[in-house]
Amino acid sequence: MTGSTARPVDLRSDTLTSPTPAMRRAMADAEVGDDVYGEDPTVRALEERVAALLGHEAALFCPTGSMANVLALRTLVGVGEEVLCEARAHVARAELGAHAAYTGLTMRTWSDPRGGVDLAAVEDLFAPDLGPFFVATRAVAIENTHNFAGGTVVPLADLEALRAFADGHGVRIHLDGARIWNAHVATGVPLATYGGLVDVAAVCLSKGLGAPVGSLVVGSADAVAESRVWRKRMGGGMRQVGVLAAAGLHALEHHLERLADDHAHARLLAEAWDVDPAGVATNIVVREVGDAAAYVAAAAAAGVRVSALGRTTVRLVTHLDVTRDDAERAARVLAALPR
């Protein structure tokens, strides 16, 4: 089959997956209750499972990753206070200003080509509490893996150094761990190790793990209790939502280790794209082209869907619904496209 008649290979995002038949059965069979009352047993099982995996006291199921990030960060940073983050961080660039709009915090950023922790820059940016004259730094947010930097993994030593800095300066750390599962599989670093280096985290079930909906705030019992109130206040209280939590439980049981397949497919595509596969840590590949919009259109016409991140930047993301055959077919298309 040619690219024009075969099913398109959709590499725009790992949010595009459909529930597997086994996941649908788990959802259909889920025991449910009213989660606003805290009475949905499947939600509670999911929250307990994720909290334990990350080594924290509690977790809160949320409909979206953006909401989970907003809720988690607001437990650390108050109105008129600031969080420091990398310039391309999802919390700064892809959540439509929700943190400022809903919680009144401010942000300042450092830039790192791989989305990592530039500790020297963090130290320079850090502002102590000097009373009613200057904005005080209350937290540092890290993203692991880093989406717009190409699915990069933040080195464990850098996270440990940031933790030491935070402890020494009285600030706290938020982890945007939407794809922390990918970091864990790529490096072998235990999830509890990552979790133990941060105060709160937001983790996502609807990206690489392939669930249709859901993220969780993870942290102390107090942080989660506070987030539960704000989830309701923001319209995120859900009722018999165990049908969705069941998908997350199934994903954690069956789709975690298979993320290694997505990483291998991403490296295959990177090589076809003239991107060094050694620099592709997980399931995301980015590259520069002459005209991103034109490139995306040409790829789509040839049966491969990728996304533009800017005027000259293109991204592809492998996921549960991309088979080895799909990846090889996409690689042939991408290798032949002018750049």
Image (tube, rainbow, N blue to C red):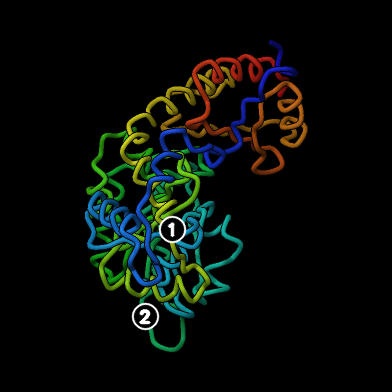
The residue lying toward the viewer, choosing from 41 and 116, is: 41
Q: Is residue 142 visible?
A: no
- CA–CA distance between discs 2 and 1? 42 Å
Residue visible at 66% across and 17% down?
Answer: 333
Residue drawn at (26%, 45%), measured in percent from left and top?
191
State the residue position of label 1. Answer: 241
Vertical order, 302 against 113 (above or below) = above
For the C terminus, which image quadrant?
Answer: top right
> Observer-nearest residue: 109 or 21?
21
In the image shown, does 121 or 38 lie closer to the viewer?
A: 38
Task: Please state the horizontal and vertical placement of residue 136, each as a whole percent of the image.
Answer: 41, 77
Q: Is residue 314 above or below residue 249?
A: above
The dot on residue 129 is 2
- In percent of width and height, residue 239 lies at 45, 65
184 shown above or below 43: above
- Residue 29 position within the rendered picture, expressed as x and y whole percent measured from the top left: 38, 45
Q: Earlier in the sequence, mark 2 or mark 1?
A: 2
